[in-house]
Amino acid sequence: MPKLVANDIAVMLKKRISSGEWLEDGRMPPERDLAVEFGVARNTVRRAVGFLEDDGTVVRHVGRGTFLTATNPDSIAATVARMEGTSPADMMEIRQLLEPAAAAFAATNASMAELNAVREAHQTACEAEDMPNFEHWDAEFHHRVFACCRNDFLKEIHNLMRTIRNQSPWFEMKKRSFSEERRQTYCSEHQTILDALLHRDPESANQAMLAHLKTVERNLLGR
């Protein structure tokens, strides 16, 4: 078996936390016990637990141990933790439900300044010279469309989805599917969405966003 690194261990620990392990007393095993279990040095486990502390999954108390921040499986924090394992297929289904509606709301509710911010993200993405820069501004385009909705709850749902999609496995999947031809296609489809927003046409914005997400789904999932 390949040697485990801190990031691998952090992912495994999160899955175990999400499944309800250690929920009864809300406390994780000592780092020395986890190091023996995973067959790694203690400092590797310490780094892994540090990742969980950074994202709010656990909190460490000197001399007492490491505790889960969400001991209630029905809490918002626990629900969010379980969502980190969302499959790409499930994510695309949810995006196709929410984002076309968000685009329609944006066409109706956005101010001109907000639409100009969407236009700026689109233009910057089209001018990007490398994949990471394009991906950043591609995501920013969608983020700014949600911001145009004037619905804070919907915007925060998108922020959660965006956080999940920024994890390493998602980026690697997008990297594998990326090509210059596809980048040009995405830019063209974003332009169609932007045109619908600027014309204050909610139905066209809805349809353009759905068509774009269908393209993304085919490229990412091959279907």
Image: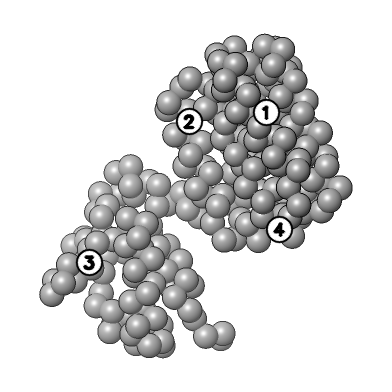
Give whichever of discs 4 and 2 has the lower sequence position: 2
Distance between mark 4 and mark 2 Cα atoms: 26 Å
Residue denoted by label 3: 60
The residue shown at (34%, 49%) is 78
Distance between mark 2 and mark 3 Cα atoms: 31 Å
| Crowd tier of the residue under label 2, counting other residues whose Cα lies within 10 Å: few below 14, some 14–19, many 20 or above | some
Number of the label disc, if any, that sits on residue 119: 1
The spot of residue 18 in percent (x, y) is 38, 57
Picture quadrant of residue 35: bottom left
Label 2 sits on what residue type? Lys
| Crowd tier of the residue under label 3, counting other residues whose Cα lies within 10 Å: few below 14, some 14–19, many 20 or above | some
Number of the label disc, if any, that sits on residue 155: 2
The spot of residue 52 in percent (x, y) is 36, 63
Which element type, helix, strand or loop, lies under badge 2?
helix
The residue shown at (47%, 71%) is 7
Query: Do tag 3 and tag 1 residues touch (Cβ < 8 Å)?
Result: no
Give whichever of discs 2 and 3 has the lower sequence position: 3
